[in-house]
Amino acid sequence: MFRATILTLFPEMFPGPLGLSLSGDAMARGLWSLETKNIRDHGLGRHRAVDDTPAGGGPGMVIRADVLAAAVDAVASPDDPRPRLLMSPRGRPLTQARVRELSVGPGVVIVCGRFEGVDERVIEARGLEEVSIGDYVLSGGELAALVTIDACVRLIPGVMGKDASGQEESFESGLLEYPHYTRPRDWEGRSIPDVLVSGDHAKIARWRHEQALRLTRERRPDLLPRS
């Protein structure tokens, strides 16, 4: 079973949307589990301090290595096979290929950063894999963790109604997904393309591929091989 453990300063943000729709139903059916742990449980002193000023000066605060390491060690033993992810804007971009790899594994341990970041030493010492969900900065890693888990959980066998649902989506073939249509056939002067109601499955498949290529060229040319 896919087990997700979240280390955060705001455990009340979970399960949030993960408790609804496909992921919530799958959790209720025992297809995956979610555990949330508060990093502040391992904080120091009367106020459970988790951060300190950055070495070398500068704005903001940094999560301490000793505090975060204790939190990681409390939820993941050295022989825990689950990848340890740190949601970070400087991480490698999360891709569909990486999501698929994670979804077939035993689960993930996700650290949600806050403030200016976390002490570099704990990243190295605990083997944290830095992951980014986009070229922008959030207030913390919690929203990124929700996105990452949702992307993984929906690919677990039995979560989606049809396995093909996850095979014909954007990025699965290296292209963006083709356009979709449904009833009514005519709406506000716009009609469903004739090929989609032709019943010719070979032509439909060809049209969908051509449309996927067109959209990818227009919107994400970086996904196409460079000649």
Image (cartoon, rainbow, N blue to C red):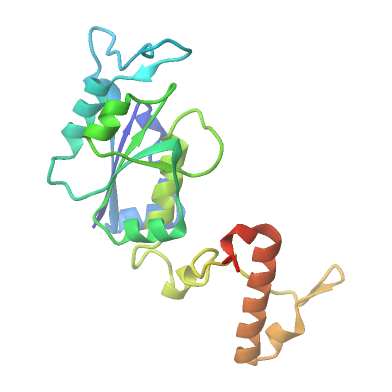
Q: Nearer the viewer, residue 91 or 143?
A: 91
Residue 63 shown left or right of residue 16 in the figure: left
Residue 226 sits above or below residue 51 on the image? below
Front residue of this view, candidates 56 and 110: 56
Between 40 and 92, the one lying in front of the other is 92
**Vertical placement of residue 86 versus 200, above or below:** above
Q: Quadrant of the C terminus?
A: bottom right
Place of residue 21 in the rendered image (x, y in percent of width and height, measured from the top left): 46, 54
Q: Is residue 116 visible?
A: yes
> Please, which residue is most extreme toward the top here?
46
From the viewer's perspective, is 59 left or right of 39? Answer: right
Q: Residue at x 52, y 32 (%)?
A: 138
Q: Position of residue 73 (x, y in %)?
A: 17, 33
Rendered view: 44 above or below 208: above
Residue 192 figure quarter: bottom right
**On the image, which quarter does residue 5 sit in?**
top left
Tell me if 173 is positioned left or right of 190 in this view.
left
Q: How many marks?
A: 0
Quadrant (top left/top right/bottom left/bottom right) for the N terminus: bottom left
Residue 98, horizontal then vertical, whole percent: 39, 56
User: Does residue 180 show up?
Assistant: no
Name the residue at 35% across, 67% down. Answer: 158
Q: Residue furthest front?
A: 227
Q: Name the residue rendered at 29%, 54% in the picture.
A: 32
